[in-house]
Image: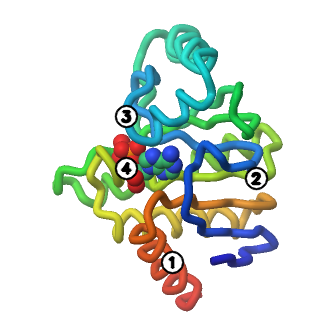
Amino acid sequence: MIANVNGCVLELVTGDITRQETEAIVNAANGSLMGGGGVDGAIHRAAGPELLEECKKIRKEQLKGEFLPTGEAVITKGYRLKAKYVIHTVGPIWDGRDREWKMEQLADCYRNSLKLAKEKGIKSISFPSISTGAYRFPVDLAAEVALTAIVGFLRTDPLEKVVMTLFSKEDYQIYERALHKLLEEG
Ligand code: ADP
């Protein structure tokens, strides 16, 4: 599905984010930035070991040894990926508690990634469905939060292209329904 938001193409696709050809792809990382499973592992494997080296450097220098806080984002190069950059953000872990707060943190992941992309002059970016794998966020709620945050950002600050890369047909359909609903509501 393709929508136009304030001159920006917003596209939903199914597929593997490591193969996206947008200028940047977003990694659903964990705070350690040391890699992991799911989309994080796939991105590190496809980018090559230099990515982990740069992540270690960020931990040490930019974050002074601390973890990257939930909802925040940092940027690295893409190395062997088609994408020139990887934006790493940390989604919230869903445990059914602090619902509103977790939704706000998830929205921050999308907003802060887009803000960082804008600051770097990046014109196209692909997101995975942050927090809906190992971090167990309900996909229908995550879709609503993600798309509301993306559309809200683009309405004041459009890029050229934003792609949501969904790993399964089921997730794609959930995001598609959420986007239709959001655009109908205006
Ligand atoms: P989190 O820890 O934020 O929940 P996960 O990587 O476990 O992150 O899952 C987030 C989403 O990314 C899930 O929907 C998962 O199916 C999906 N995913 C896993 N690998 C890929 C990939 N290569 N490309 C796109 N999405 C992926």
- Judge the density around disc 4: few (<14), some (14-19), many (≥20) Cα neighbours within 10 Å: many
Q: Amino acid at mark 3?
A: Gly
Point out the residue furthest to the bottom here. Answer: 184
Above-or-below relation of 125 to 143 = above
Viewer-closest of 181 and 81: 81
Query: Residue 89: in sight, yes or no?
Result: yes
The mark that comes first in sequence, 4 or 1, is 4
Q: CA distance from mark 2 to mark 3?
A: 25 Å
Tell me the residue that label 1 is attached to.
176
Q: Amino acid at mark 4?
A: Ser
The mark that comes first in sequence, 2 or 3, is 3
Instruction: Note whether ligand 1 is within 8 Å of mark 3.
Output: yes
Could you tell me residue 142's position as x and y percent? 39, 63
Disc on res. 124: 2
Could you tell me residue 157's position as x and y percent? 74, 60
Q: Amino acid at mark 1?
A: Glu
Instruction: Note whether ligand 1 is within 8 Å of mark 4.
Output: yes
- Asked which secondary structure carries label 3, the reply is loop
Tell me the residue that label 4 is attached to.
131
Instruction: Note whether ligand 1 is within 8 Å of mark 2.
Output: no
The mark that comes first in sequence, 2 or 1, is 2
Q: CA distance from mark 4 to mark 3?
A: 12 Å
Give the residue at x 31% y 52%.
Answer: 102
Tell me the residue that label 3 is attached to.
37
